[in-house]
Amino acid sequence: MLRRIFAAVCALAAVVAIPASAQTQALTAEMFARDANLWSASLSPSGQWVAMIQRVEGGGGESILVVDWRTRQAQAVQTARRTRGLFLDWVTWKGNDRLLFSASQRVDWDGTPQDTSYSVIRRVYSMNRDGSGVTQMFEGQMRQLLNADYAPMHLIDVLENDPENVLFGTWGQNGYTVYRVNVATGRPTVVDDDSGWDTGRIFVDGAGNPVMRMDFLSYGSGYRFFRRSPDGGRWQLAHEVRRSTIAQNRDFSPLYPGPGAGQVYVAARPEGQEYQSIYLYDTRTGELGAPIYSHPNADAEAVRVDPNDYSLLAGCHEAQRWQCRASDPRMQRHFDAIAAYFQGAADFTLQDVSRDRSTWLIWVDGPTIPPTYYIYDLNAAQITPLGSLYPQIPRAQLAPTEVVNYTARDGTALWGYLTTPPGTSAPRALIVMPHGGPESRDSYGYNFFEQYLASRGYAIFQPNFRGSEGSGRAFANAGHRQWGRRMQDDVTDGVRHLIQTGAADPQRICIVGASYGGYAALAGGAFTPELYRCVVSVAGDADLVQMLDEERQGQGRGSSGYAYWVQITGDANRDRDELIAVSPARHAEDFRAPVLLIHGRDDYIVRVEQSETMRDALRRAGKTVQYVDFEDEGHYWGNWEPENRQRLLEEIDRFLAQHLGAR
């Protein structure tokens, strides 16, 4: 399945490739639309080596690199060729001398490599650090143990204190099964097969005991978490999440093994609390206990633990910026020094830590610093770049982002992000970009879409309106049944604030969005037509009655998924008039601005019929509308093929230039 690369040694500088020069070069849609160049970086326990996956130049495939960051040498030890339908998924360390990695192959049902109409077979391998000694996990026992050839294998735990074995989970002959697998031989041993076919993941404590599991509910309408004692025994229901799959789950999420038997770090938001906190959950009793990490005005979302004993190293939260706080004040001083090094232009996350804690792998991300891996040497207090995910993007030409605070018409304090292209003066042509979800949020960091638009000379405003996550339970709930009303007013009030403060040219404003943001763009064109010169909706809902009918037919009237949509939008029968009042397709005659509609034909989140309904309504009303669809693409444009992402950017760029004028 894999082809070895022998003795492929290169200078680390070739891996790094982080353009920081102020020299101006032409920025193209193709540059912004490329897939990431690096991913899945992992630090060896000794801290000497980093393993990562890098795309082979020219699009021929992907390679696993082992980098000695001190000597600045990198060796490509395995490669997967795209011409054979092969892809590398992830790589991680098992000790200092052996690696685990996952590879996928797209095949049709008779096993022939395919580019379309395919299924995916994933296999996991171990190998020595130099790429020798490749062993397939479960080798020779696949058909005997697994339910199907394409049953994926999930790495549950690398078992830091067991030098020979790791834990995997997959669907065996009797349901979801946990195996202890020897990394030298690939031979598995059943650890636990007491889960069903609905199980999708198993969580362990610090000793490797399977103590929690996650089961999927039907139609993607939610999931159940179960718990049990580290000694085994009967599974007991711990928590049930009944929500749409596109809504974030703030109520209960296992994160990482805890330091004691039966302990698991979880992020949870108990009833009556505004924000999510981090707890050490006791799987014996089902008790959360007191929070071990929290923030008074933000959701605590992640932890980083000591690889030796799973004690807490740091907790992270996201308010207007992402921030991690260390448990040890001495460690926090280094956190502060790293933040100062990037001069407030980027946020960072502790990705991996050596066993002696002296070497850190960190992930850095900011509007003008595309995601980049760095090594931080604690003893030397020195930072070393490893590689950028998007090395083709010149940092010096990216647009900085600032937080804009404003007040809604009812007095509620709101905020958003304003990205301003360098070299422009206020007032500027403005692109208003509401986020999707709607129970999601915008974050501070690199965004290929907004940076591409900024490179064309536009300022971009991203409001976090009511209904958004990240500002508390009450703030998110305040958006329920407020589509086209309070949520839209919050967007409008942000735009008017930018006009009043001189940041935006009132004659040169367009609204652009995807998913819920696409609905908000259409609602802006329908309900505040005087504000916008043009409207772009990518996979946006246009008729809420039609949308609810589609959800009911797809999931069933009694499903929790349909109940979720009724909760946040309204009932298609009882609230029909109210839903019609805020459905842009029912108000096509009120549009003044030309509209661009874009949709992937394989979108199963927002059906393509929504854009087609909007197109037909605008045409009947005699309005200006363009419609572009993409074959074989789904809902999330970040997952589209690069050539289609490029075309998406170019279509929107042409439309905006036509109605706002390009730089």
Image: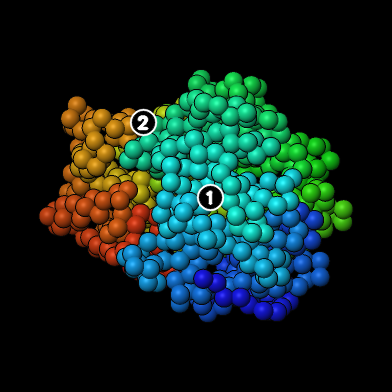
Q: Residue at x 54, y 38 (%)?
A: 192
Residue 488 falls left or right of residue 384:
left
Toward the viewer: 27 or 308?
Answer: 308
> In the image, what residue type sits under mark 2?
His
The Cα atoms of the two marked residues, 2 and 1, are separated by: 36 Å
Toward the viewer: 461 or 314?
Answer: 314
Circle 1: element type: strand
The colour scheme of the drawn protein is rainbow
Q: Earlier in the sequence, mark 2 or mark 1?
A: 1
Toward the viewer: 432 or 55?
Answer: 55
Q: Which mark is residue 401?
A: none
Q: Is residue 391 shown to the viewer in this render?
A: no
> In the image, what residue type sits under mark 1?
His
Q: Is residue 480 shown to the viewer in this render?
A: yes
Check the image and report above or below for 655 versus 516. below
Crowding near the residue tagged with mark 1, few <14, some 14–19, many ≥20 C-alpha atoms within 10 Å: some
Crowding near the residue tagged with mark 2, few <14, some 14–19, many ≥20 C-alpha atoms within 10 Å: many
Furthest residue in direction left, as rendered? 620
Residue 552 falls left or right of residue 659:
left
Residue 15 image point, x, y percent: 67, 71
Residue 568 image point, x, y percent: 34, 32
Q: Residue at x 73, y 51 (%)?
A: 163
Residue receiving disc 1: 154
Residue 459 image point, x, y percent: 48, 57
Residue receiving disc 2: 480
